[in-house]
Each structure stands twice: as C-alpha cells, then as structure tokens.
Image: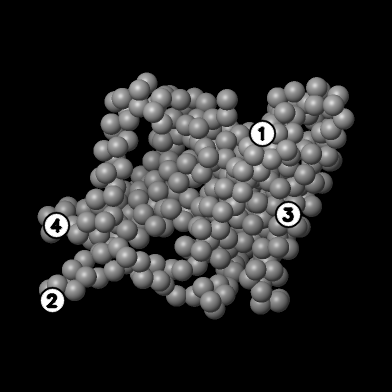
C-alpha cells in the first residue's frame, strides 16, 4: 500500500476520496436536497448490498474459472454450463430431500466429477492448444445447453430458501429519520448476507491454500514449469485434475447459490460465463484477490447501474473492462 501511494499519489488520493464518499453515503443521514437529486437512501443502500452480494456470487463462479483459466491455462468456455448444471442438481436435491445444505454437497461432487471428465478426456489431449480448447469447449457448451434444456425444460426454477434463513434482518444503517426523530434502519434478506459471508470464507480459504500450503506451492510451480516439477517426482497431472475438479465444483456451488436468490433458466450459463470473463479480465488472471475485487466492482456496477441508469446498465460493466484493459491490461491484481 505504501509503495502504491508513493508511485501513484494522484490515484491514491482519488481512491481515498472515493472511499470517504462511499462511507458518507452509507453511514450519514442524507439531506433532503440529496434525496431529491438521486432518490431515497433506502433504494441506494439496497442497490449497494445487492451489488455486494451479487459480487459474492460472481466471485464463486469466477474463482473456479480463474483457477482453470488463469492458473492452469485451460480455456474452458463451458464453465457457464457447469454453473447451470450445478444449479439444476441443487434444485433437484433440495426439492426431493428438503435439505438446502445437502444440495450444495451433491452439486459440488457431481460438478467436480464432470470437471474431472473434461480434464481427462478433453484438456489433457489438447494441452497448450488454446484455439482448439476454445472451439471444442464452445461446442461442448452448446451440447450441454441442449441436454439440460431437454432434461429440465425451459421453465424457471428457484431453490427454496431454508426456514432459518427466510426473512430480513435489521442492519445498523439509518435510511431515514421519522418526524418524531426516530431513525429507520435498513432491513435486508438474511440469506443473501449468509451466502456473501460464505463466499468470503471460501475466498480466504482458497487464497491461503494457494499461497500458504505445500499443495498451493506445487500448483504454482506446475504452472510456471511443469517439466521441472514432474522431474522432482510430483504427479503433476493428478494435481491438475484435482484443481480442475475444485474449479468445476465451485461453479456447481455457485449454481445452487444463484438458484437460491435468483432463478435458474436456459441462458444463465452464457450470462455467467460472460460475467466470469469480465471479472477475470478486470481482476487479473490467476489471482484470487483479483477475482474478488473484479466481482465486487462488476456486481456493484450492475446493480447501481440498473437503479440509476437502467437503459445503459449492461454497458457500464463493459466500459469498466475497456478502461482496465486500456490502463492496466494484465488486470488490477494480476499474478506476477
């Protein structure tokens, strides 16, 4: 942080001002003139929290994608299909057993197994051939989409939220003040906050595993020079299969999350594949903190844009991506 301030004092000042403004907009009571200009504070805070929790969902999808694409250099454009498959599996398990938590476990295992099959049958035969991987996985995503449409139909599905997570929770954020002087606090769905907290825990665990454990050292060494690592006796192909399974399993978990507070339907695979690409480009390939930062930025941009500039909301995310590519092509927090 000190180096960044020393090298880029102007950008550091802009970041500090932006953080201070965001904190004031979140914590302070808005004057009437501000509410007349940009709307009620409750709407703004809901958009902010929706963006943060949507960022948590994007992170779960993009973290698996950045493991496979950024670390292993495997171009898997069928990653969105893994998300939708995991969501459908989670819905089926939740509807048949009534267990929300069990749906996460089964979706992770089955999606990870699909990832293992992709690694063994497809990617191992095309290592280092990015164009072939791209074309083959595009074809696979089309096949998977048709198979899921045939099996599940074109209806919308939503995974039932468990009873202990139903309902809002009151947060210590004042949205307005009544004429009597009594403050009105923000109420927000508990399930979204719990899912966001779980995504933070998963992100921290992944970062620690990659940067503070032996298996993480082996993965990073295998990416940089797999021949030397294999010469030391490490079964590098087995390690890569496990990493691919983890990345695919995270996409399956994200599918259950998405099906819980959004919905599952044909076309969601393409949407989340594009979101993962944008998040990884903004945050930096192979970087877990970069995926977290990129997911947060894109989630906030989508939700705030849909509230304040709904006509151009989808354009905002791509403008952010273009700006990052112009200023820092490797991504905000790319691996060195």
Instruction: Give the labeled residue for mark 3.
Output: 111
Q: Split into 4 quadrants, where in the image is the C terminus? A: top right
Q: Sequence order check: which comes first, mark 1 or mark 3? A: 1
Residue at horizontal 55%, vertical 72%?
A: 161
Q: Secondary structure at mark 1?
A: helix
Pick the residue in front: 172 or 246: 172
Residue at position x 75%, y 29% from top?
Answer: 222
Q: Quadrant of residue 176?
A: bottom left
Please report whichever mark, 3 or 2, sits nearer to the chain's N-terminal start: 3
- Give me the residue at 48% from left, 63% from top: 192
Q: Looking at the rendering, in which quadrant would you find the N terminus?
A: top left
Mark toward the viewer: 4 or 3: 4
Give how far apart the Cα atoms at labels 1 and 3 are.
Answer: 19 Å
CA gap between label 1 and label 4 equals: 48 Å
Judge the density around disc 3: few (<14), some (14-19), many (≥20) Cα neighbours within 10 Å.
Answer: many
* Residue on which the image places disc 4: 31
Residue 276 in percent (x, y) is at: 56, 43
């Amino acid at each position: 942080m000190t180096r960044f301030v020393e090298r880029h004092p102007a950008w550091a000042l802009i970041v500090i001002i932006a953080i201070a403004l965001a904190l004031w907009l979140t914590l302070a009571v808005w004057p009437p003139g501000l509410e007349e200009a940009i709307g009620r504070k409750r709407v703004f805070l809901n958009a902010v929290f929706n963006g943060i929790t949507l960022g948590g969902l994007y992170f779960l999808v993009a973290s698996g994608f950045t493991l496979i694409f950024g670390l292993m250099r495997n171009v898997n454009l069928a990653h969105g299909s893994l998300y939708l498959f995991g969501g459908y599996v989670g819905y089926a398990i939740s509807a048949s057993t009534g267990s929300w938590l069990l749906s996460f476990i089964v979706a992770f295992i089955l999606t990870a197994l699909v990832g293992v099959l992709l690694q063994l049958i497809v990617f191992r035969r095309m290592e280092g051939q990015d164009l072939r991987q791209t074309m083959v996985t595009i074809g696979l995503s089309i096949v998977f989409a048709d198979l899921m449409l045939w099996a599940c139909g074109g209806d919308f599905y939503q995974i039932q939220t468990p009873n202990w997570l139903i309902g809002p929770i009151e947060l210590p954020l004042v949205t307005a003040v009544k004429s009597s002087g009594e403050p009105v606090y923000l109420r927000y769905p508990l399930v979204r906050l719990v899912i966001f907290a779980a995504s933070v825990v998963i992100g921290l665990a992944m970062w620690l595993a990659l940067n503070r454990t032996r298996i993480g050292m082996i993965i990073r060494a295998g990416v940089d020079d797999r021949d030397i690592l294999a010469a030391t006796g490490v079964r590098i192909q087995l390690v890569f299969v496990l990493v691919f399974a983890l990345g695919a399993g995270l996409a399956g978990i994200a599918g259950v999350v998405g099906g819980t507070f959004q919905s599952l339907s044909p076309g969601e695979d393409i949407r989340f594949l594009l979101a993962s690409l944008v998040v990884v480009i903004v945050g930096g390939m192979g970087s877990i903190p970069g995926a977290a930062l990129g997911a947060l930025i894109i989630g906030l941009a989508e939700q705030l844009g849909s509230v304040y500039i709904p006509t151009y909301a989808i354009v905002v995310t791509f403008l952010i991506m273009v700006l990052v590519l112009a200023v820092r092509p490797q991504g905000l927090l790319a691996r060195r």
